[in-house]
Image: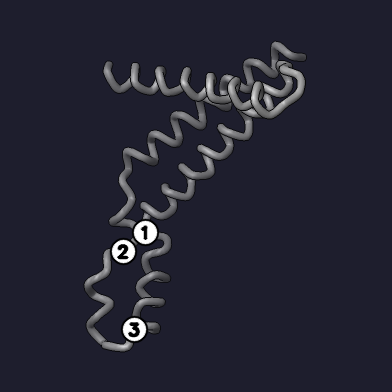
Amino acid sequence: MRKGTNHFILIVVHCLVCLLLIILFTKNVSLLAYINTTFYMGALYLIAGLLLYVISKKFFDITAFSFRKVFTKWQNSFDEYELPSNRVNTNWVHFFFIQGGALLGVMLILLLLYY
């Protein structure tokens, strides 16, 4: 239950940040500007989540390992580095997916109200 409330609070904070960005950077505050801003933030979160998802599924491990093998001077020095998939925490992947999906959901609801 605590996780759900944390996500809901962060979604509300993100909506307020979108509103603050509109007030600071646009001349007139309109629903269309808010829809555009929530789309940009939601898309940014989903892209970050997708990138972390691809990295966590070991897509770039072979490439990183090969680059380390080619560009190291000593033969055994590439064994001490951690692979990219081991550095990604899956909690962050879920966070970005939930927040980006919620922002895009808010954007779609507002878009239906707008038209």
Return the x and y of residue 101 as percentages of the image width and height.
51, 29
The answer to whether 36 is drawn above or below residue 1 in the figure is: below
Which of these two is toward me, 83 or 72?
A: 72
Q: Nearer the viewer, mark 1 or mark 3?
A: 3
- Going from N to C along the chain, the mark reached first, 1 or 3, is 1
Return the x and y of residue 74 as percentages of the image width and height.
27, 88
Which of these two is toward me, 23 or 54?
A: 23
Q: Residue at x 36, y 52 (%)?
A: 56
Residue 17, by quadrant, is top right
Q: Are marks 2 and 1 in contact (CB under 8 Å)?
A: yes
Protein image colouring: one colour
Q: Please give the label number shown on residue 58.
A: 1
Return the x and y of residue 65 as percentages of the image width and height.
35, 73
Q: Residue at x 48, y 45 (%)?
A: 50
Q: Please give the label number shown on residue 72.
A: 3
The amino acid on which the numbered mark 2 sits, given as a three-letter code, is Leu
